[in-house]
Image (spheres, rainbow, N blue to C red):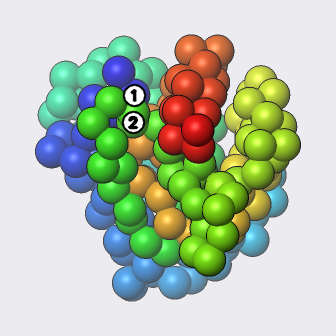
Amino acid sequence: MAEKLFAPDTPLGKAIYDFQRALNDDDRQTRAQLRRAGDLTSLVLVPGVHRLLHNLQVAAGEQNQTRLYLHSDRGRLRVAVIAGLLAQVKHHEPIRDKYRHSTAVLMAQGKKKSDGACVSELRFRRLLQADNLEALYPMLRRTLALMNHKTDIYALAGDVWYWNDRTRRQWAYDYYAKSA
């Protein structure tokens, strides 16, 4: 479900892509503000978050996704976290696995010149223990740096949007299947 909501060929996916591309190409000031934001309150104070929120509201209308609740506090915080994490991503790296669609697939991939995963099992377990976005955001920011600032932006957005027990279980399946 997460991968379908922000799929590249949907209006929501295009809004995510356009935002991330603008951060890397044109809007360096917003990118810097988002990268400095260490918590959710700091993220909400960045005007770029509100631009993304508006663009996602328009895209949700086009996509007939009225149940996203982008006007609620929870929905707006999700958008802020997505914006903050997209500012950490320098390169979009699509997940090429046919059956696995979460960001954890890329976390389990080996580093260059090493057999170990980009993200250690201990750090991965700590990520899975984050039960809310406030706890997840700072850990995922640091994790993206370990991944050389590369991830699938659509999977990342979907994982953040649907951060719950089901998403955590899917991450565990994907991480351990890829690293095994």
Q: Residue at x 43, y 72 (%)?
A: 91
Mark 1 or 2 closer to N-term? 1
* Tally of marks: 2
- Kind of residue at disc 1: Ala
| Image position of 41 with respect to 73: above or below | below
Q: Residues within 10 Å of mark 1 (few under 14, many from 20)?
A: some
Instruction: Measure the C-alpha gap from mark 1 to mark 2.
Output: 9 Å
| Image position of 82 with respect to 164: above or below | below
Are the residues tagged 1 and 2 within 8 Å (C-beta)?
yes
Q: Residue at x 28, y 30 (%)?
A: 4
Q: Which residue is mark 2?
A: 101
Residue 115 drawn at (x, y percent) = 65, 62
In which quadrant will I find the C terminus? top right
Q: Which residue is mark 1?
A: 2
Q: For this rendering, which residue is in front, 149 or 44? A: 149
Residue 20 drawn at (x, y percent) = 41, 65
Q: Residue at x 18, y 30 (%)?
A: 63
Element on which disc 1 rests: helix
